[in-house]
Image (spheres, rainbow, N blue to C red):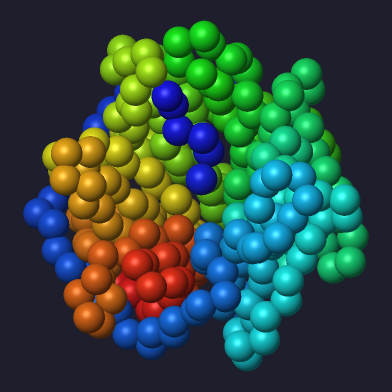
Amino acid sequence: MHSRITLIAVLVLSISFSCHAQQTATCDHWTFLKTFSAAGINHWNTVVGSATESGGTTGLPPVSGYIRWANGGVQKYKFPGATETRFYKRNAAGVTVGDVDFNHGLIVTGSSATTIDYPGAPQTILTGINKWNSMVGTYQYNDDADFGPEWTGFKMWKNGTFTPIDAPGAINTNPTSINDTGIVVGWYESSAEAVPFAADPSHGFVFANGVYKTVSYPNAFRTSLNDINTAGVIVGSWINSDTGKGGGFLFVNGTIKDVLTPGGASTEVNGINDNGYVTGTYSAGSFMAHCQ
């Protein structure tokens, strides 16, 4: 089955970036987090994410959103009446986006919270936000008997209007981030590669100036681009279906740089800010580090 999700192009092209030889990123200032799975980091090194918890009365384990401030303080958030609340990204102004029960997009500003639904869609998720309060996300547009739920992307402008983001030939398009210059990154699954009742390969994409470009980690079964900063530095993750091996990386000027913990453990890199700090997860929890 297809993976559950964890702008009108003036010119639409599918172009693969030329990736230079792989390197290992140089990282320092490591901070390890145990409370939640880190998904995004803003200019002030505020990290957001979510955690599955024990208990619950609906048959599903409860999920709460979390904010970790730069001083180490942690705040837990639960949308009123929801079983699941997830945070994915937060901008410099402190606006956080995510989802409620995997059905509604969520915007949290201070003590105010608003849900967002793509018109006519049964499920909507907000995954990214920039300083202009332009947001990206994904919504379910079909539920196929063979392929399961199918998703496509959108940009939501500050005034609340929507513009589609749909990679050429994709059966699923999942934007994950929009930077302050309006460049969108994410991942997609191609209809040409889709196999009924099976996991499908995925590719990262960059969408800028009406053009889609594909980025795939060498020899990976699945690639996801998870965030992009104003300088255009991208972070992402990959996995190999045969070995189960995977990892996180930076994509800088056409060069892939693997991100490893000080102990050499693989990571999943989910967020990056304009200061070069990244955040994500590894086998023992979450982390924040400065990487280049």
Q: What residue sits 64% from the left and 63% below the top?
A: 53
Q: Nearer the viewer, residue 202 or 179?
A: 202
- Looking at this rendering, what residue extends furthest in the bottom direction? 71
Q: In this rendering, would 289 be left or right of 132?
A: left
Which residue is drawn at the image coordinates 71% and 50% (left, top)?
Answer: 84
Residue at 56%, 69% (x, y): give it: 36
Q: Residue furthest top?
A: 145
Picture quadrant where residue 189 is located? top left
Q: Quadrant of residue 67?
A: bottom right
**Rendered position, 70 above or below 39:** below
Horizontal arrangement in the rendering, residue 53 relative to residue 174 (left or right): right
**Residue 240: percent from left, percent from top:** 21, 43
Q: Quadrant of residue 198?
A: top left
Q: Which quarter shows the C terminus? A: bottom left
Residue 195 visible here: yes
Where is the N terminus found, in terms of image quarters? top left
Horizontal and vertical percent position of residue 165:
56, 27
Q: Residue at x 53, y 38 (%)?
A: 5
Residue 12: give x, y in percent of width and height. Answer: 42, 20
